[in-house]
Amino acid sequence: MERPTKFSQMRSSLRKLSGPAVSGKVTSVGGLGLTASGLGETAKIGDAALVAGRIRAEIVATSPEGIRLLPFGTWDGIGRGDQVELQPGGGDIFPGSEWIGRVVDAFGEPLDGIALPDGPCAYPLRSAPPDAFDRRVMGAKLETGIRAIDIFTPICRGQRLGIFAGSGVGKSTLMAMLARQTNADVIVMGLIGERGREVQDFITRDLGPEGMARSCIVVATSDQPPLMRRQAALTATSIAEFYRDQGKQVLLMLDSVTRFATAQREIGLAAGEPPATRGYTPTVFTELPRLLERSGPGSVRKGGGDITALYTVLVDGDNMNEPVADTVRGILDGHVVLDRKIAETGRYPAINVAKSVSRSLPGCHVPIERAIMNAARRALARHADVEDLARIGAYRAGSDPATDAAIRFASLADGFLGQGTRDPQSSEEAFAVLYGLLADAGVEVELPEQVNPAAAAAG
């Protein structure tokens, strides 16, 4: 074990040595952007550069007037005539098994100040997903321990699910529950644009030692430049691809993909792109699928594991149809909607079952589970239809037995769907409890013919 570690550290040092220098000069600085000349035809879009020997930057546009760069920091202290030097090979990371349990920045550098050796090989920040025909189908069901998800929006291995909510409705807390309780081998989490104050709170209080023991966390806080926020999402995805190729079942969690899109919008505007849909530039809607498609089932031919991905979407003004939310919903394999009205009643997680969908259904449930889930959904939908009438007294009990049963079930289901942050329950137990609630409320469940109702009631 000692020799590979030393070799890894040596290669990490060699990788940071500079090669043949290709340099130019700063000709203008304004806003987020900087223009440089003298780099000729060597500079390409996406290449890394170093300005004045201290500020990392990336080339985002080229033109006859010069090369346009954006910083991974700020341009404070930079002026005309400062040197701009290309940095070849700056777009790779070297993840390894030692990264589990660590917190890194967008470049893969440790944030705790303790050395982190390179892994066995380089992984590019941008890579193509497995070929569509070469991918496996989604695998077995993943247990999350969260009743509302395991029953109504189940997650299978290799599935990509979005968690849609406004601010302050419990996205981060739900993500922490999933990180602690989901039966994955490795968890890779990207905290994109998070408040700096909340990073330590999330790691120590919400995630806890049991979650951190199998996690690698990539952090780019809200005060950091747009390039850092975008790169953190790419870095987290590349780390997940490394563990997938090691044969691991990986749970990738990005909080949030909206902040990735916002960062890309800022980059696009600084590069000279025109604003399109609600101020978002065209590259936002090309970068989103390029990022999201990299997760999912692994390759049939190459083997390895799968990347099951959860992406939070911070909807603007609780509008579920705003451009980023609408685009992401069309790419992913389902979505969980957190409802502010439910949160205001004190029920957490505030999942709106009626608006949440998993495209792993119906195959993710066995027949008896589908029957119980469908009966519960129908009852909740019927209750939603008459809820306002019942509240104002316009519906009289006894008018319709099925509606009466739905109203009784809705009051029981409200307590069932609420759950403590450290109170996991297996899906088998959850389905047994739900079947009992349906029976207590008088809701009819159309069980498959081969199922014995007495055995089902016994769980």
Image: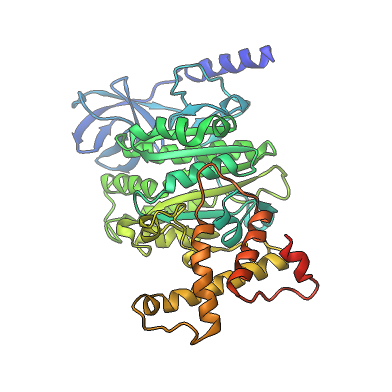
Instruction: Name above or below for residue 136 compared with residue 408.
Output: above
- Quadrant of res 46: top left
- Is 161 drawn above or below residue 391 in the view shown? above
Residue closer to the observer: 40 or 359:
359
Measuring 32% from the left and 38% from the top, which residue is drawn there?
222
- Residue drawn at the location 60% of the way across and 44% of the way down: 182
Which quadrant does the C terminus fall into? bottom right
- In the displayed structure, 116 sits above or below 327; it is above
Name which residue lies at 32% across and 49% down: 265
**Relative horizontal placement of residue 37, taking residue 345 as reference (left or right):** left
Q: Would residue 279 be seen by someone viewing this image from the given angle?
A: yes
Q: Position of residue 19 (x, y in %)?
A: 46, 20
In this rendering, the answer to whether 45 lies above or below 20 is below
416 sits to left or right of 4: left
Question: Where is residue 81 shown, x and y percent of the image?
Answer: 21, 24
Quarter location, residue 97:
top right
Foreground: 166 or 206?
206
Q: Position of residue 369 (x, y in %)?
A: 68, 65
